[in-house]
Amino acid sequence: MTEGILEFGRALYINTSDVLTGVVRNNALSTGRSLLQVIWDLRLGREDLVSSPLFPVILSVAFYFSLCTPFMIADIYGKKWKWIQKYKIQTDKEVTLDQVFDTLSLTFWNHVLFILPAAVGQMIWTPPTPLPELAPSWFEFIWQQIASLVVFDFQYFVWHWTHHKVRFLYRHIHSVHHRYHSPFVWVTQYLHPWELVTVGFLTTTNTWFFKCHPMTTWSYMLLSIVVSVEAHIGFDLPFCFNNILPFGMIGGAPKHDMHHLKPQTNFSPFFNHWDKTFDTFCPPMKAGGVRPKNLVEYERRTKEIKKVC
Ligand SMILES: [Zn+2]
Ligand SMILES: [Zn+2]
């Protein structure tokens, strides 16, 4: 009798825990799925607009300007705002209105002369984007964006390294971007048209390797903008990727700031592994212009090597 009760209890426990685990898992899956699906379903009734080849162009241009504007306000009007200025990397440099005007002018002309015609060409020659019924799964949505970013990081590392090492390419193309030794937000797209076209081409084609869902492709496009803008904001903010992701795998604004100061170092746009592998990594300055021990040590070693040479 007692054994029978125990057996029944055991069976009840196993069944209940199985059911509960299943319910939790299914709920998690359906909630995860439905959040992306809810966003994806926003297209309903707007299919003509969303499937147009112009849609990603308008989305990314609008996103770029909306993301940059608050940092421009902080640069121009927030010179005395301690809550943000304490995160500035090159504390002795100020952004002037002339610099903002200069960088915005080039950005404007690049958009009018290159991005707009490319968008019109796309509209004429590219068919509308097919829009599947279902959103991608979370797993697919995340891994494909990370993979695209890893691929882009390597492609740009090679492009960037080449455009520093080959004098002709540096002088006629990449030096435009290096006009400013202390980056601020609009320096992100202060680029020679060839660099702008290359970056645009790489960002667009990366997702083709993985046959991404349109939602993943567009999200990756926005993620690339976040990454490139973040690299140029000139602030080491606590919520940026380099401060929230582990193992020092991300360079972020501090590392790219150092690239503008020491242009023969830190060629990777996002991750650190290629620079560490090829010995082009220079430890960055931190918020408030703090020079960490590894940077002091790096500079001491570099001086010694120069003396020997
Ligand atoms: Zn830069
Ligand atoms: Zn460079």
Image (cartoon, grey):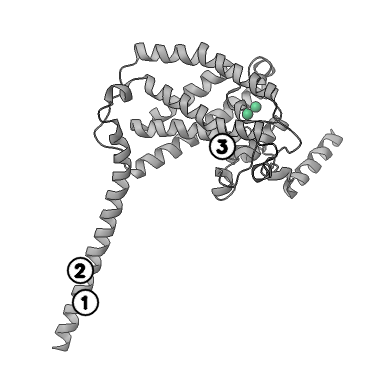
Q: Amino acid at mark 1?
A: Arg
Q: Amino acid at mark 2?
A: Asn
Apparent side of residue 15 relative to residue 303 in the rendered image (left or right): left
What whole-number distance in Å separates the C-alpha atoms at marks 2 and 3?
48 Å
> Quick one: label 1 or label 2, which is nearer the N terminus?
1
The residue where tag 1 is placed is 10
What whole-number distance in Å separates the C-alpha atoms at marks 1 and 3?
53 Å
**Where does residue 73 sit, x and y in percent of width and height?**
61, 32
Q: Residues within 10 Å of mark 2 (few under 14, many from 20)?
A: few
- Disc 3 secondary structure class: loop
Q: Splitting the image into 4 quarters, where does residue 10 fall?
A: bottom left
The residue that appears at 22% across and 71% down in the rendered structure is 14
Q: Residue furthest bottom?
A: 1
What whole-number distance in Å separates the C-alpha atoms at marks 1 and 2?
9 Å
Q: Residues within 10 Å of mark 3 (few under 14, many from 20)?
A: many
Quadrant occupied by the N terminus: bottom left
**Where does residue 132 sit, x and y in percent of width and height?**
26, 31
The residue where tag 3 is placed is 270
The residue where tag 2 is placed is 15
Apparent side of residue 113 relative to residue 83 in the rendered image (left or right): left
Quadrant in which ligand 1 is drawn: top right
